[in-house]
Image: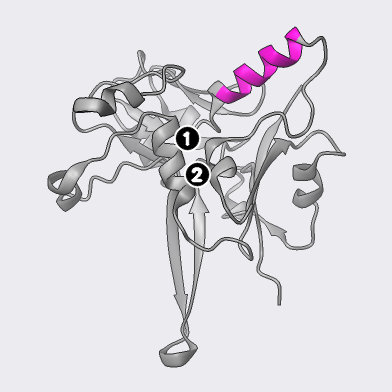
Amino acid sequence: MTRWGMAIDLDRCTGCGACMAACHQENNLAAVGAEQAEKSRSFHWLRLLPEVSGSGSEVKVRYLPQPCFQCHNPPCVKVCPVHATYLSEEGIVGQIYSRCIGCRYCMAACPYNAKVFNWYEPEWPGELKQKVNPDVSTRPKGVVEKCTFCHQRILTAREEARAAGRELRDGDVTPACAESCPAQAIVFGDLDDPASRISRLARSPRAFRLYEDLGTEPKVYYLAEKE
């Protein structure tokens, strides 16, 4: 069984934001606008967190792309009273929007702040309606949303592999964020495949995971900057 994971090389990331833009386009995320932003209602499935160190001419900025960490032991799943959030057999934490009642317990339980609440009815005015991805649903007001590792792309790649009479190969699935990254800082694949690139990176001496001591067992690995 596949266990999907991601590695992000912090030595390569330039903070350009292409991954965030691609995530919005691929997953039908509407812009919140100035009014909602003033209320701190951001709406990103993938965030780009800056970290500033030093001062003056020695100041240094690095960026930490943060999607959903698809925890193997997800606290969000345990607290949902209607089972709207769940852990799939392939290790992806999914969200059933038709079940979600908007209680936001899952958001409170997530230590990575990886989920967002849809505060308003999204709109795509004018020609933007023609750019909505037909492979991804649009979500109504009042539900919790999150990154799914572009699950629709996983399903498409699996169908194409089945039609070709073969198994999925390493590199068959590329989420929108990884595809758009000009520095190729994001790698995606099967963690249980010892020959896959993501599996090798997860075993790298540079690899680390956020808040490992919490026991959530995230499937997103970061590669520390080279000295």
Is label 1 in contact with label 2 (beta carbons under 8 Å)? yes
Q: CA distance from mark 1 to mark 2?
A: 6 Å
Q: Position of residue 124 (x, y in %)?
A: 23, 27
In the picture, measured across the screen, residue 171 lies left or right of residue 142, that is: right
On residue 51, the disc is: none
Question: Please, which residue is most extreme toward the right here?
Answer: 195
Badge 2 element: loop
Q: Nearer the viewer, residue 226 or 86?
A: 226
> Which residue appears at 30% of the width and 25% of the height?
143
In the rendered image, the quadrant that contains the N terminus is top right
Q: Main secondary structure of the magenta part?
A: helix
Q: Position of residue 45 (x, y in %)?
A: 41, 40
Q: Position of residue 58 (x, y in %)?
A: 49, 89
Residue 15 lies within the magenta run: no
* Callout 2 amino acid: Pro
* Callout 1 amino acid: Cys
> Which residue appears at 62% of the width and 23% of the height?
154
Mark 2 surroundings: few (<14), some (14-19) or many (≥20) residues within 10 A: many
Residue bearing mark 1: 147
Residue bearing mark 2: 67
Q: Which range is magenta?
A: 153-163
Q: Quadrant of residue 227?
A: bottom right
Q: Quadrant of residue 27?
A: top left
Q: Nearer the viewer, residue 211 or 123?
A: 123
Question: Please, which residue is most extreme toward the front here?
Answer: 127
> Vertically, is 100 above or below 63?
above
Asked if residue 2 shows in the view, the reply is yes
In the picture, measured across the screen, residue 67 lies left or right of residue 184, that is: left
Badge 1 element: loop
> Which residue appears at 64% of the width and 66% of the height?
11
Among the two numbered marks 1 and 2 on one chain, the one whose residue lies closer to the N terminus: 2
